[in-house]
Amino acid sequence: TQTYRIATIPGDGIGPEVVAQATKVLDAVLASEGASAAYTEYDLGARRYHATGETLPDKVLEELRGVDAILLGAVGDPSVPSGVLERGLLLRLRFELDHYVNLRPSKLFEGSTTPLAGNPSIDFVVVREGTEGPYVGNGGAIRVGTPHEVANEVSVNTAYGVERVVRDAFRRAQARERKHLTLVHKNNVLVHAGHLWSRTVAAVAPEFPDVTTDYLHVDAATIFMVTRPERFDVIVTDNLFGDILTDLAAAVTGGIGLAASGNVNPDRTAPSMFEPVHGSAPDIAGKGIADPTAAILSVALLLEHLGHADAARRIEAAVAADVAERGSTQRSTDEVGAAILGRLA
Ligand code: NAD
Ligand code: IPM
Ligand code: MN
C-alpha cells in the first residue's frame, strides 16, 4: 500500500484547529483507497518565531522538499509585526517550491447562505500567479517616517513567469466543459505588465483553438463577480489581483469558510502545498468555532494532485451534502469535521 509523506504546518490562530479536522478526513479517505499518510508536523509560525527568531529555517525547507505534499493551516499573528511570518514563511515556501499556479476554485454549493444563493451555475476557478508580481518584495523605502518618505513596491512580471501560468490556465480551461478563459488585469493603467499579460494570452491562444478568451479590467471583474459570476469559467491573473478576487469570490459563493486553495508546482520539481484561502482569523481563534470546511476541501485538492481524483470527488460530495443541510445553526469546528467525516464513512 502506498504511504504518502505529508508535511503539516498548522501555523497560527485557527490554523491548527482546522488542520486537525482536515487530517482526519485525509486519513479516512486514504484508508478507503488502500493508502495512508505519514505525517511530519512542523512547528512554524508565531510560537517558533518568538522562541527562536526563526520563520523558516533552511534545514526545514530542505526537509520539506522531500515530502509528497504539504498541508498548511494559516500563518500570521497579532503578536508578530505584519509581514514577518507572511513573507518569511508562507511566501518563502511558495517562491522556493516554485508554486507558480495558485489554484482557487469557487463553486456555489446548494444551500449555502450567500448573496448569490440560487444561482446554480457558479463554478469557476481562479489561476492566480504565485511567484511574481508585487509579492516578490522588490521595493524599498527612503526617509521613512518623515514627511518626505517614498515607499516603492515594484511588481515583477517576467515573460517566462507569465507564459507558464497562462499556459497552465489554458490547459485547465481546455479540460473543462465551457472552455473559457478570462484574463483579468489592469492594462489600461499598468501598461507594462498589463500588455505583457495580454500579449502572452494572444500568443498562447492558437495552441488551444477550442478555448475562447476574453479580457476584463480587474475593477470591472469585481462587478461581474457579484452581478454575473456565472460568466466566469477559468480566470488567469496576477498574484495581487488574484489574492483580492479570490476573497471576493469566496464571500459571494458561500463564505470564506468554504474556500480552498492549492499552491501548485505543475512541473513537480518540488511538492505542492494546500491551504484554505482564509487566514489565521485572530478574532475567533481558540474558540473552537472556525469552519474547517475550507481546509477539508484543500485536502480534496491535495488528493487530486496525488492522483486520487475519485477520493477528491467523494470529499466534495460529502461537503456539498453537509452544506445543503447546514442552515444557519452555529456548529463547532469539531462538529463540522465530524459531520463531514460521518458522510464519508
Ligand atoms: P482572515 O481570513 O484570517 O479573517 C477574515 C475574517 O474571516 C475574520 O472575521 C475571520 O474570523 C473570518 N474567517 C476566516 N476564516 C474563517 C473560518 N475558517 N471560519 C469562520 N470564519 C473565518 O483574514 P485577516 O483577518 O485579514 O488576516 C488575519 C491574519 O491571517 C493576518 O496575519 C494575515 O496576514 C493572515 N493571513 C494568512 C493567510 C494564510 O496563511 N494563507 C491568508 C490570509 C491572511
Ligand atoms: C492568501 C493570503 C496571503 C497572500 C498572505 C498571508 C501572504 O492573503 O493566501 O490569500 O496574500 O497570498
Ligand atoms: Mn488572501
Image (spheres, rainbow, N blue to C red):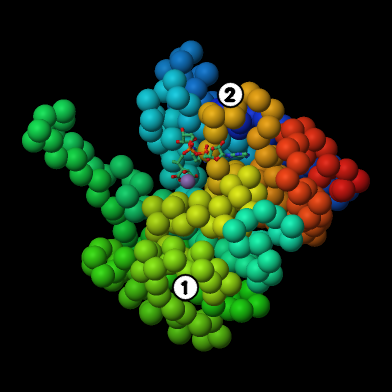
Measured as percent of width and height from the top left, residue 152 is found at: 20, 44
Contact between labelled residues 1 and 2, with CB atoms less than 8 Å apart: no
Q: Amino acid at mark 2?
A: Asp
**Kind of element beneath mark 2:** loop
User: Residue 43 has which mark?
Assistant: 2
Callout 2 environment at 10 Å: few (<14), some (14 to 19), or many (20+)? some
Measured as percent of width and height from the top left, residue 25 is found at: 78, 42
* Residue labelled with disc 1: 182
> Left or right: where does residue 130 sit relative to residue 139?
right
Disc 2 CB within 8 Å of nearest ligand 1 atom: no
Residue beneath the point at 44% across and 63% down: 222
Is 24 situated above or below 316? above
Disc 1 CB within 8 Å of nearest ligand 2 atom: no
**Kind of element beneath mark 1:** strand
Measured as percent of width and height from the top left, residue 321 is found at: 81, 55
Of pointers 2 and 1, the one earlier in the residue sequence? 2
Q: In which quarter of the view is residue 295 placed?
A: top right
Residue beneath the point at 51% across and 64% down: 226
**Farthest residue toward the left?**
148
> Left or right: where does residue 290 sit relative to residue 199?
right
